[in-house]
Image: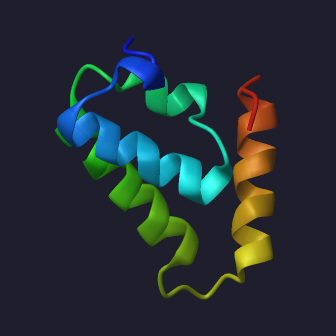
Amino acid sequence: MIPPEKAEGKLKAEFDKAVRRAGKVFNILRIQSLNAETLKASMHLYLASMYGPSGLTRVEREMLGTVVSWANDCFY
């Protein structure tokens, strides 16, 4: 993994966006740090799923994410 303080180019841009969104770079993003394009695509999918048009409210989507993460023994 490439730590945020050593990120450059496209990876730095994605990490900077993460800090603006969440105040830090979560481990799920750090794991994808070796391929900035994959990280960017992953974030696009996440943002579309969580903020795009849906029959679910934002709260319902967060609740689903939390429950699925808990069921998978994963910190969310």
Q: Quadrant of the N terminus?
A: top left
Viewer-nearest residue: 34 or 16:
16
Viewer-nearest residue: 67 or 2:
2
Residue 33 picture quarter: top left
On screen, residue 69 above or below 43: above
Q: Quadrant of the C terminus?
A: top right
Q: How is the image coloured?
A: rainbow
On screen, residue 44 above or below 57: above
Q: Position of residue 30 (x, y in %)?
A: 46, 24
Q: Position of residue 45 (x, y in %)?
A: 37, 58
Residue reaching furthest to the top: 1
> At 79% across and 73% down in the image, what residue appears?
59
> At 72% across and 26% down in the image, what residue appears?
74
Q: Position of residue 70 (x, y in %)?
A: 81, 34
Horizontal side, residue 42 vs residue 55: left or right:
left
Horizontal side, residue 58 vs residue 37: left or right:
right
Viewer-nearest residue: 51 or 3:
3
> At 21% across and 27% down in the image, what residue appears?
35
Horizontal side, residue 73 vs residue 5: left or right:
right
On screen, residue 44 above or below 59: above
Report the label total.
0
> At 65% across and 52% down in the image, what residue appears?
22
